[in-house]
Image (tube, coloured by chain):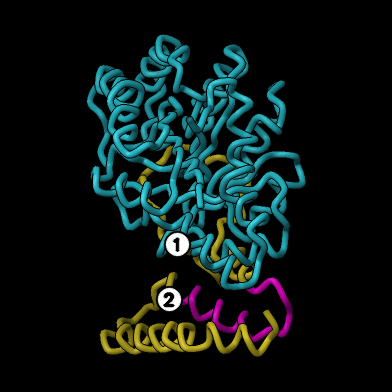
Chain colours: A cyan, B yellow
Amino acid sequence: MPYIDPHIHMVSRTTDDYERMAQAGCIAITEPAFWAGYDRSSAQGFYDYFRQLTEYEPKRAAQYGIKHHCWLCINPKEAEDPGFAREVISIIPEFIECDTVLGIGEIGLNKNSKNELVILEEQLALAETLGQLVLVHTPHLEDKLKGTRLILEAIANTSIQPERVLIDHVEEHTVREVLDKGYWAGMTLYPDSKCTPQRAADIIELYGTERLWINSAGDWGPSDPLSVPKCRLELAARGHSAELIDTISLHNPKTFLSQSGKFCTE
Amino acid sequence: MNQQEIIDKYFQEHRAKLIDIASFLDRVDRCAENEEDFRVHAMKKCIQELLVEQSNRAERILLLLSDKSSTPVDQASTKGASGAVPLN
């Protein structure tokens, strides 16, 4: 059965993963710009990364029939130096018109610092000016609750419509607030942190499927590029309908992403 | 799924996780130091919370492990997260 993984960092994965995802039914992915596991030494490093995301990865994915799209930004882990972050932000408009760029992301907060917040606000302003969709990273572990609230406040201070923003990595303590304010919410399926497929299934049973999706956020750390089909299996094992499973893992991503005017699965 | 089916499907897996926690706490005890690490202390608080007969256990545990402050910190001194905050 076809599915979309709307958040995965394929630059960190092998081509074998593309093959296994295709075999499991993946027809499209979107790849937000993120931290490489080390700080880049110059804005030129991001220029090369954005070229990788817009030129190279779509070709690698296409070999397995998977449509590849991306999001561009400077991630919060490299936003502590505002001068450097602004240099990177200045590069983004050059790439934003590419056919496969869906918007600004994954912006957000990491340690909830003042500088991270300033750079988040500046990238929200960029999305506002350029009329782009926004994909938001919420912080890890003990920082998530506070960070999510600071992020929601920052977005509320812009004219960006909530239905054009996806707040990612929600868990049981943040999902309600995100959905109640009209945003889309993403559940990331990780083996050790964030949601397991079982917990994501629990959240779906508690909150329904409206404006909710699942993703693997597969990257260079402990993560599983097949976690979306595993969650589909979990839902099926609990007796949920094929319609519900397709809504959460295919139709909902398509609905949100199609607002970009660029997203396609063929 | 009814309650019996849920228990049949998931009990063994969560029994194993429970023993993992017990084993982890034993391991920490074997290397006991004077002051308890704030993360281990938080974990023990969470275990107590699990026994409160009220729904939303996952949400309550996550809240216990969360920073409840509301203003941005001056500077990010690290990139990582520890998974818990000091609790009284």
Looking at the rendered structure, the kind of residue marked 2 is Val
What residue do we see at 39% from left, 73% from top?
Answer: B37
Does label 2 or label 1 sit earlier along the sequence?
A: 2
Q: Chain of mark 1?
A: B
Examine the rendering and report whether any part of residue B85 can be seen. Answer: no
Image position of B73 (left or right of A49): right
Between marks 2 and 1, how big is the CA–CA gap? 10 Å
What residue do we see at 45% from left, 41% from top?
Answer: A27
Examine the rendering and report whether any part of residue A232 can be seen. Answer: yes
> Magenta stretch: residue B44 in it?
yes
Q: Chain of mark 2?
A: B
Residue A13 spot, x, y in % from top left: 27, 45
In this view, A244 is above or below A198: above
Residue nearest the observer in this picture, B72 or B24? B24
Label 1: few (<14), some (14–19) or many (≥20) C-alpha neighbours in 10 Å: some
Image position of A96 (left or right of B68): left
Image quarter of the C terminus of chain B: bottom right
User: Over which residues does the magenta segment extend?
Assistant: B40-57
Image quarter of the N terminus of chain B: bottom right
Residue A18 spot, x, y in % from top left: 31, 44
Label 2: few (<14), some (14–19) or many (≥20) C-alpha neighbours in 10 Å: some
Looking at the rendered structure, the kind of residue marked 1 is Gly
Residue B52 spot, x, y in % from top left: 68, 84
Labels 2, 1: front one: 1
Name the secondary structure under disc 1.
loop
Residue B83, label in figure: 1
Q: Which residue is mark 2?
A: B40
Which quadrant would residue A167 be assigned to in this image? top right
